[in-house]
Amino acid sequence: MTKPKSRSIRRQLLAWLLLPLSALWLVSTAIGYFRSVDLAEDRYDHELINSADSVIARLEVVNGKVVVDMPPQALAMLKHGDNKFYYEILTNDFAKVSGDVDLPGPQDELPPHVPKLTYGVIEGQKVRICTMRTFVENHQDVSVIVECAETVGPRENFAHQLLIGIIVPQLLLIALGCLAIWQGVSRGLRPLGELEKELASRSQFDLSPVMDVNTPQEVQPLVHAINDLLGRLREDIDSQRRFVANAAHQLRTPLAGLKTYIGVVSGMAAKLNQKELGTAVSQLDNGLNRITHLVTRLLALAKAEPNAAANIKPQNFDINLVAAEATSDLVSDAIEKNIDLAFEGGPGPLFVSGDPASVRELVMNLVDNAVRYTPVGGHVTVRVQNGSNVTLAVEDDGPGIAEAERERVFERFYRVLGTDASGSGLGLAIVREIAYTHNAKISLDGGAAGGTVVKIEFSKAPTASGNYAEVN
Amino acid sequence: MRILLAEDDEFLAGGITLALTNANYTVERAKTGTDAEHMLRVQEFDLLLLDLGLPHLDGMEVLRRARERGNALPVIILTARDSLDDRVKGLDSGANDYLTKPFELPELMARIRAMTRKQMWGNSLEYVHGPLKFDTSSRRVTVSGEVVDLSARELAVLELLLQRAPRVVNKDQIAEHLPSWDNDVTHNAIEIVVHRLRKKLECDGFSIRTARGLGYLIDKA
């Protein structure tokens, strides 16, 4: 597939203007032509008739014969411009009286004093002929036919002049219009050019919004769309940066601790007393446990990811049972910290569709988190509630999570500032992945007692018809 | 030598503290950025080991504020952030050195020694005061060629007096520089330490003098 040629606004505007204007111009030229020819004909015919009248005025009857007194000077006066002038006088019965040429006689009966105008050809040139029947002055009984002719060159010239006078300014007007569009488009698109310059001159790290104070109304939506995209990109990059920083911190700090203790044990063993050496070794063990925990969590997270989870065949299971089991597993941890861990199950079995092992992992992560971050002597409650959906809620009365951080705690390796507990920062990320693969809605709010409530809403499994909810 | 360790991770902080106290440094620990800032405001330290990812207040901000107040103490950043950008930013905002986690303990110790050598002894490897010689790297003391074995407290007091010589150092200043397990060091205890130091070191050409009611000083060599 070839790349479609990009369209030019300027060319399109020009086309939209030029096509109708050219059509209009053609029509106007045609009308102008006929109108000019008419006008020229009117004017020159009028003069031709006048010339005929002048010839008539020179008719006399001498000795009963019609004669015309036409000296060359008089003849010259009858010529207009550089046309050729001919005349012929015929008697009523078409006998030539006088004249310098043979003109075609009238074809039919002519009423007196009414000029008849026709076209003809003399000496190969097109002429206009005026034929008129009249009476010689003072001899009302002598009727003659006077024919005058002149070449049409001048009148055609006149018509052409008129036509040019009409169409040339119109052509100029169209040309000026094109020029104005060309310029206007350049001028109108200048803000786009400035926008382009601003974007092109930016470094790839500058994702600040584009200023829209000087942009015209029509370009504002574009600027807003660009700013919107930049904003989303900024958020994305920020979250990526946070992830890298948090991951580095979470992974490298325990390693640094291990190395430090190894350094102490190997380099300073001679100076350490037995008790200090014992402490260092048990600290090394602690550090390894912590890294083991981290690796386990990372693997759990990898398993919870949609690609891996897609291979698990969903089944219907009682979430009441799974949640109760998962909670029981953490009771000893809670007791150790003197935390009151309670389970409030729903009425009877509540079936949801999915992977029970994953949901168990989800519950354990939530409870583990709650126990970990709730101070000694606190309360943690796990609830399963029936409604239009099945809701699993884990509530604690710990320090709570500031609103601004509630979205971020689901990010990998994110840890709430100021918490001393040594979490991996992956617990809630795992919870989110598992909830996501189960199409469950997840929400985090402040609890009634000031702590935190995490709610996971599962849709109910379809009844025993065998149709499992689809797991994506 | 008093070092402030600003590190939120208990495990790592424990290891570093153990290593530093074993090398006869006095270590104070700040768990959060705000704690570190507060301690830097009210106490005097010879070195700051600063983690950047501190709770409440980022390490970089702690450093910036300290420098803004005109605090010139040497600072080594210890952080997991290892990008070039981070390292440059860290050094540019006033740190003197930058170590990426996980680091080797001997390297950290050597950097601390290098830093304090520069800060306290003008980069010289050996500080000589009459018959007394002080090795600024190993912090070993010899008098007329004989090695003198000193306890952590004795070493701390001697270092302070040598650095400030020939000015008077009062007992409160000395108390501040003593290792952390002696937090409620009494003036009496200081007198005992000075007494022992005199016993071990005093010879022809070196003495610790008492400025009555003011403190102690080491005379010009």
Image (cartoon, rainbow, N blue to C red):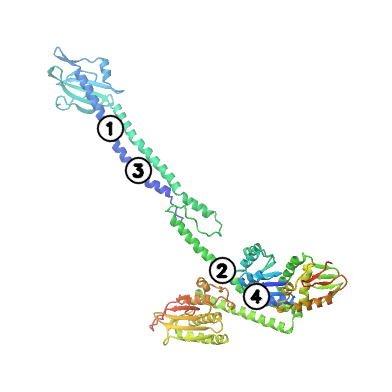
The part of the image, by quadrant, that contains residue B22 is: bottom right
Of marks 3 and 1, which one's residue comes earlier in the chain? 3
Q: Tell me whether the residue at label 3 lies in contact with that at label 1, contact meaning CB atoms closer than 8 angstroms.
A: no
The disc at residue A242 is 2
Q: Which residue is mark 4?
A: A255
Callout 2: helix, strand or loop? helix
Nearer to us in this view, A74 or A232: A232
| Residue A344 visible in the current orientation | yes
Badge 2 and badge 4 both on one subunit = yes
Q: Tell me whether the residue at label 2 lies in contact with that at label 1, contact meaning CB atoms closer than 8 angstroms.
A: no
Q: Residue at x 53, y 73 (%)?
A: A409
Callout 4: helix, strand or loop? helix
Three-letter code for the amino acid on which mark 1 is drawn: Val
Q: Could you tell me residue B78's position as x and y percent?
A: 66, 70
Return the chain for callout 2. Answer: A
Q: Which residue is mark 1?
A: A37
Return the chain for callout 1. Answer: A
Callout 1: helix, strand or loop? helix
Drawn side of residue B40 relative to residue A437, left or right = right
Q: Which residue is mark 3?
A: A21
Return the chain for callout 3. Answer: A
Q: Tell me whether the residue at label 2 lies in contact with that at label 4, contact meaning CB atoms closer than 8 angstroms.
A: no
Q: Residue at x 64, y 78 (%)?
A: B11
Q: Residues within 10 Å of mark 1 (few under 14, many from 20)?
A: some
